[in-house]
Image (tube, grey):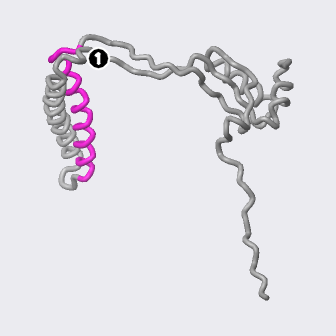
Amino acid sequence: MTDSPSPVTAPPERPAVPSAASRRSIGSFPDYAAAEQAVDALSDRGFPVHRVAIVGRDLELVEQVTGRLDYPRAALRGAAGGAVTGALLGWLFGLFSWIVPLIGLLLLTVYGLIFGAVVGAVLGLLVHALQGGRRDFASVTAMRPARYEVMVDEDVADDAVRLLGWDR
């Protein structure tokens, strides 16, 4: 009878980001700055802050309407985006100009800017026309939490509360 070697198992590693079940909330704050101050206070007192997380709760999507979007504005927005892209591409190709480096760099950047603006304006108009009036406004979208919680690993949460002087 031969003895077969037993499989070697590696010890479980601590995950880079612990699960929510292994953390406890030690404070809830109305804004990020207040949560940041609590973590900074822990850091100042020598607490192992790599065991702390600031978690945004109750996320809401906010779409701020910035104005009406008509054909001229759609063309302008497209031209602006295209000009930046074209200028960057022209500048990049200009870096590889070996004949007259500085002039080649500048010319390709300007040509890229002009070509990008024209193509961007045309595409901006085309996209706006294809939408058929369904979205005649421009907006900026952002996610924002209603509150921030300072979460600490369960096994050191009591130490964090004690260091901050909060009674639980």
Q: Quadrant of the N terminus?
A: bottom right
Q: Is residue 86 magenta?
A: yes
Element marked by disc 1: strand
Q: Main secondary structure of the magenta part?
A: helix
Report whether 137 appears left or right of 15.
Answer: left
Image coordinates for residue 80, horizontal then vertical, percent: 23, 26
In the image, what residue occupies the spot 71% across and 33% down?
52
x and y percentages locating residue 87 in the rendered image: 24, 37
Characterize the local packing of mark 1: few (<14), some (14-19) or many (20 or more) Cα atoms within 10 angstroms.
some
The magenta span reads 69-96
Q: Which quarter of the figure has residue 126?
A: top left
**Residue placed most toward the observer, 75 or 149:** 149
At 25% from the left and 53% from the top, the residue drawn is: 96
Q: Nearer the viewer, residue 75 or 156?
A: 156
In the image, residue 54 lies in the stretch drawn in magenta: no
- Amino acid bearing label 1: Ala
Q: Is residue 123 above or below residue 71?
A: below
Q: How many marks?
A: 1
Where is residue 117? Give x, y as percent. 17, 31
Question: Where residue 109 sits: x, y (%)?
Answer: 21, 39
Quarter the C terminus occupies: top right
Residue at the spot 22% in from the left edge and 42% down from the top edge: 90
Camera-nearest residue between 32 and 21: 21
Residue bearing the label numbered 1: 138
Instruction: Identify which residue is drawn at 44% across, 17% down.
Output: 62
Residue 66 drawn above or below residue 120: above
Q: Quadrant of residue 134?
A: top left
